[in-house]
Amino acid sequence: MHDKILVLDFGSQYTQLIARRIRELGVYSEIKPFNTPLNDIKEAFPKAIIFSGGPASVWDKDSPSIDSEIFNMQIPILGICYGMQITVHLLGGKVERSDRREFGPAKLKIIDNSDLLAGIPDGSDIWMSHGDHVLELPEGFTAIAASDNSPVAAVKNENLKMYCTQFHPEVVHTEFGKEILSNFVFNISGCKSTWTSKSFAETSIKDIREKVGSSKVICGLSGGVDSAVAAVIIQHAIMDNLYCIFVDTGLLRFNEAAEVVESFKHMGFNLIHVDAKDRFFKKLSGVSDPEKKRKIIGEEFINVFDEEASKIEGAEFLAQGTLYPDVIESVSVKGPSATIKSHHNVGGLPEKMKLKLVEPLRELFKDEVRAVGFELGIPENILNRHPFPGPGLAIRIMGEIEEDRVEILRLADHIFIDEIKKAGIYDEIWQAFCVYLPIKTVGVMGDERTYEDVISLRAVTSLDGMTANWARIPYDVLEKTSVRIINEVKGINRVVYDISTKPPSTIEWE
């Protein structure tokens, strides 16, 4: 059994980063809402707990809090930013509203480098983001670091193994943040680095074999990384009792259907190819709301599965490539916060679904999925393929779904991918695609005036899709792409480039 660190989420935009940084150290980490019942926390048997930051003030009405009994669990606790302030507040210290918010870079002035800050150079860069500050420490706590604007930048109670930082060690802007987290995880908490792609694959295969037994599993193949890795894990577990269904929704990328069928039959899978284009287009007719599109596609996808499953005797399970970010974004772990958007993998499942779920990737971030895939010997051309959303091109068409719009977008998208591959930058980009905008703009082709639609290019760099920056594609590649799309794709006379980051924007437009 792997050591586990729980991250209690108080609403920070960086909460997922904390979990990722811990996993990068080879220790399993899991995010739970701040209001998770204490008994549930105890039953998870964590080696340590981390309180995330958050936008609230301890003085706000209805600000998130925790059961103070958590401090009696006698396991190490690290509070970050708001996590520090709520710790100090609940244990009898004083937190004061600041006259001005401290946001951005600062220098760490180390007072005590014996444990949490062991080996961290004095004067190194840290990242601050807070509105309140600690005025008085609880009994038994001492300051171990300061900054120019924060006399108390980090504290500890060595006897209770409780540590707090006003700054964010999880962000890249904190120069030695990973080393600080490493000190907490290994030196203070005594965790062992056993969380690896190999160990995950072995455990997952064993768990699926025990869960499924001699039953048959139906797995949806999309041709993407997630479904491929999920399918291979399950195939290792139950061999020929896995039946893979590839549903052609009519919303796939250029030539994708033929490539998927060829690749997975070559890999020895039991593959059932279902051409359901007409069904999906009929259901989506006249629908423009993005959430409705997702729900319709998810439900129809499951309907197809139910129909195919009824033809396979002993089929009791449905496999999905749900990832941890899907779970985080679709079922908010921040208590009352709003859902950003539902995902095809987790947002469209009807209650009447006849099959039980198997989700072997539910605990993984995207880069971890790829690492597991390499461990299992999946070909690089599948693993390195850019992510593709479950609803497909439907959420890359703003407005109603029409077959001619899908064809226009599919061809434009193919041209964009072709040009970045020719430029040798495909693997440097996390995700690249086109978005169809049914916005008429004036253009001139030859001597004639045109009044046609717009294609937006979208390309981002990212580690796991939780945060993303727009890719700095060379101008000549953008120019070639634009010229080709306007010349080769009938109905488009304008190409634009999306330079938004996530947050505040999302990667997909819908």
Image: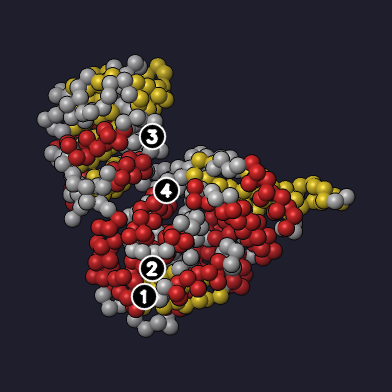
What residue do we see at 46% from left, 56% from top? 384
**How far separated are the C-alphas under marks 2 and 4?**
21 Å
**Residue 253 on image: x %, y %:** 57, 62
- Discs 1, 2 touching: Cβ within 8 Å: yes
Whichever of labels 3 and 2 marks the residue nearer the N terminus, that label is 3
- In space, the residues marked 3 and 1 are separated at their CA atoms by 42 Å
User: Residue at the spot x=55%, y=60% of the render?
Assistant: 392
Picture disc at residue 125: none
Which image quarter holds the N terminus? Answer: bottom left
Q: Is residue 494 visible?
A: yes
The image quarter in which residue 405 lies? bottom right
As drawn, which residue projects farthest toward the left?
Answer: 159
View extreme (right): residue: 447
499 sits left or right of 245 in the view: right
Dot 3 or dot 1: first in sequence order is: 3
Image location (x, y in percent) of residue 2:
20, 52
Q: Horizontally, is 135 left or right of 288 in the view?
A: left
In the picture of the structure, the residue carrying the numbered disc 1 is 242
- Decide: few, some or many residues near mark 3? Use Cα within 10 Å; few <14, some 14-19, many ≥20: few
Q: Which residue is mark 3?
A: 172
Q: Which residue is mark 2?
A: 231
Q: Provide the residue designation for mark 4.
A: 464
